[in-house]
Image: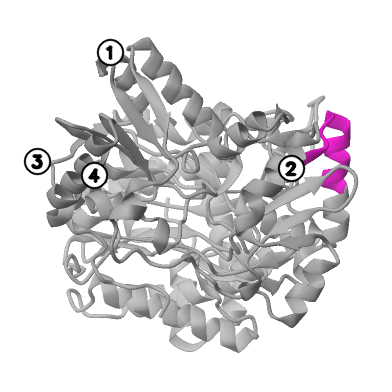
Amino acid sequence: MFQSFESESDPSKGAEHIALLRKWLNERGLTGFVVPRADEYQGEYVPPRSERLRWLTGFAGSAGVVLVLMDRALIFVDGRYTLQVRDQVDTAVFTPVNLVETPPDAWVRANLGKGARIGFDPWLHTISEAHDWRAAAEKSGAEMVAVEKNPIDELWADQPAAPLRPVEIQPIEFAGELAKDKLARLAGVLAREGATHCVLTDPSSLAWAFNIRGSDVPHTPLALGFAVIAAEGPHLLFMDKRKLSIEPEAYLTQLADLRAPGTLEAEIAALAAKDARIALDPKLAAERLRTLLEENGGKVLQLADPARLPRATKNEAEIAGTRAAHRRDGAAVVKFLAWLDAQPTGSVDEITAVTRLEEARRQTGEETQRPLRDVSFDTISGAGPNGAIIHYRVSHATNRKLGDGELFLLDSGAQYQDGTTDITRTVAIGRPTDEMRERATIVLKGMIGISMLRYPKGTRGCDIDVVARIAHWKAGVDYAHGTGHGVGSYLSVHEGPQRIAKAGTEKLLEGMILSNEPGYYKAGAYGIRMENLILVTPAEPIEGGDIAMYGFETLTLAPFDRRLIVAALLSSEERAWLDAYHARVLAEIGPMVGGDVLKWLEAATAPIDQ
């Protein structure tokens, strides 16, 4: 079982822990401290050792930051966690603030008084974040103070050890390009940009560049470490050798000089002293790396991580792998949906649904000899009002039956060695209300709108996000999250830099994989989300057109619940897309299932009645 159902939050410890932190700050002449949900690699998923924000507050979300002052404490979260944060923290101790409406630096600029000294750990903030905090503090007459030791690490008595999971080599049949060739490409970029070196700080970039995978963080096959890529000369890889068996160590030794993680600062300082010009991505690299370089005479070049775009634009082997992974995953999801439909109303709970779906994925992987390696994130299994919590995570304490007349939102994904999946389907349990059906059809229209879209070269995610919201806005509703995130190739299910969102400024390039997932959430009642993964591809030429266009190939293969579709609200073009999609699902998944499951699938994919 990959997913635990133990409660991840303990709000009762908030007052005790914040008192310890304030005592620590007072002894050092600090009037506040910033605690982000981050580790030194700045990834979305962090090992248990780095869950400092959860230790302090009880909040288990994947993004957030706390500002602790002597007289109050604020926890900043985005719209995904508006409901969750109030359930998981003691709001008598921590005041929730919407970080989109009131960014932390804006709050600091407006509220900190003169003379305030706010501590921060420079390993846990990117260069850009640290700059924004400093600028905001200076505006209010305050000061940001970098600390040498993180206070949480000193106060957390039973803090877990750093992970030491084994590293494995990603075979060329799935990677599609040799690591030595990838590293040569990165070295060429550095030479053109006038850099002598760059530091790869994103573990996904490290995994991609060296064709390695690991399991140091939950559900994402990452081996935590840093690399210094050289424009000329040997590369350096900082990774604990206890993670390396004989074969991976011999493999990596051919690509880079292996170094112990504890020597990173000394090696960086030594390079800086030799007048190195080292590239750091200001949105990814820790502030500590910048100060370390500058204090030792090096020059910092603020450049985007050179591996991010190559990693995001999948090659032929990666695309073939993800298509195969989605077919297997689609068969597993179909088996689960058919099973769920056959259960008596009210007999299934959220945890049972999660475990049954995971079993279907395991079984399908075994049958096809492409085993399920992990889930790609903790499954969101939300019945009724729990579905309205955008990033809900079921536990034994919150587990709920799928009740008659309710909606069930199931957002899940899998990690296979040839691809990463992410799919959401919303299912009616019993008879849905007219409002539920109308809202679900609005969400479906938004998803179809993105799926059918054609757009010119250079289009960004922010340029098309509105397409998914047109039907929502016409109905006077919206959703508080982006429409789509990037997805890796047996890597992070939330990959950058590509995204479909109001803040998605990266161009959509051929080979990028994204999610397409509009939603609707009625607090205390139900949630709806429909999600497919899509691949950026050249579009068929448009008759009479005079420019090349791009579009999306849908990768995910599973039917939508017909009980939640109001056919009259779909245009003829939308109905044609849906019927064609369902016909494709039957054609590709049908041969992988049989018996009652095939009969269920045939009914689920029949043309929509007009």
* N-term-proximal mark, 2 vs 1: 1
Residue on which disc 1 sits: 114
Q: Are marks 3 and 1 in contact (CB under 8 Å)?
A: no
- Looking at the rendered structure, the secondary structure element under dot 2 is helix
Q: Are marks 2 and 3 in contact (CB under 8 Å)?
A: no
Q: Is residue 59 visible?
A: no
Q: Nearer the viewer, mark 2 or mark 3?
A: 2
Callout 3: helix, strand or loop? loop
Query: Cα distance, mark 2 to mark 3?
Result: 48 Å
In the rendered view, how is the structure colored? one colour
Q: CA distance from mark 3 to mark 4?
A: 17 Å
Quarter placement of the N terminus: bottom left
> Mark 4 — residue?
21
Q: Amino acid at mark 4?
A: Leu
Q: Is residue 192 magenta?
A: yes
**Which residue shows up at 75% across the image and 74% down it?**
249
- State the residue in front, 587 or 202: 202
Look at mark 2 in the image and give the residue it sits on. 270
Residue 92 marker: 3
Q: Decide: is 346 above or below 460.
A: below
